[in-house]
Amino acid sequence: MDPFAAEKNPLLEYLHNNPGRLIDKWVHYFDIYHRHLAKYRGQAVTLVEFGVLHGGSLQMWKHYLGPRARIVGVDYNALCKSIEEEQVTIYIGDQADRSFLRQLAEQVGKIDIVIEDGGHMMNQQIATFEEMYFRMSEFGTYFTEDAHTSYWTRYGGGVRRPGTFMEYAKGLVDRLHGWHTEDPEALSVDDFTLQTAALHFYDSVLVIERRPSAQPQRIKTGKPSFPQKGL
């Protein structure tokens, strides 16, 4: 049983009783957030969210994570800079600009959580992942939201269309399994294999857990009950 299913979700409570700025999110995201972010509550962590809009979700993260958290928003709209507040800093730039992303990571320093909810174009989603993921804390959590735009032509998407974020993410599944390949020319252990624990695919959201990962070890204990073949 999901341990979060039986308890109240403080993020949903905040959403439905929003005392601050506008929040625009799909409702089913909030259980995903709580499942993966509850461990950070009360900790001195840094969360970076791409896509500020009116700043409501930044206020929500501040409330949810607590007074020790640092909240960073990133948006191309210069007006967003005006909604900075205590614990909340806004950077203005284009997330498709890889030099901007590198400068952002250098300026922000240690990042524990990335929530990519920016422009949703394929080049933006892929560039942001490639430039930010390996610059996060080694025990960080990375979210790509609204991944359904990979199926929408106006965002550069299309079902199984090469170059979409979802097709790119399917390649990440292969890379996670780099230890098990029998064809090292086609697939091998790389930085993603060595630094990733899990990928969680949900409707429109991909959550990636970053963690140093060693080669999997297999163990057998106890006595066999009958002859066994295969694995």
Image (cartoon, rainbow, N blue to C red):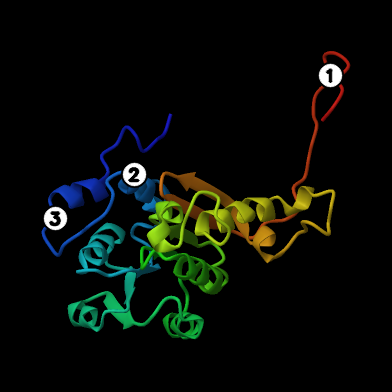
Q: Which mark is residue 68?
A: none
Q: Which residue is mark 3?
A: 18
Q: Residue at x 36, y 51 (%)?
A: 33
Say which amino acid is labelled 1.
Pro
Residue 40: percent from the left, percent from the top?
40, 58
Q: Secondary structure at mark 2?
A: helix
Query: How many other residues sit within 10 Å of disc 1, few (<14), some (14-19) or many (≥20)?
Result: few
First-in-chain label (3 vs 2): 3
At 62% from the left and 56% from the top, the residue drawn is: 172
Which residue occupies the foreground of this view, 85 or 95?
Answer: 95
Q: Amino acid at mark 2?
A: Asp
Q: CA distance from mark 3 to mark 1?
A: 58 Å
Q: Residue furthest top?
A: 226
Residue marked by disc 2: 31
Q: Residue 37's image quarter? A: bottom left
Whether residue 49 is situated above or below residue 15 in the rendered picture: below
**Where residue 231 sits in the image (x, y, percent)?**
82, 30
Q: Sequence-wise, which precedes: disc 1 or disc 2?
A: 2
- Local packing at callout 3 (Cα closer than 10 Å; few below 14, some 14-19, many 20+) is some
Instruction: Give the left or right position of residue 230, taking residue 37 as reference.
Output: right
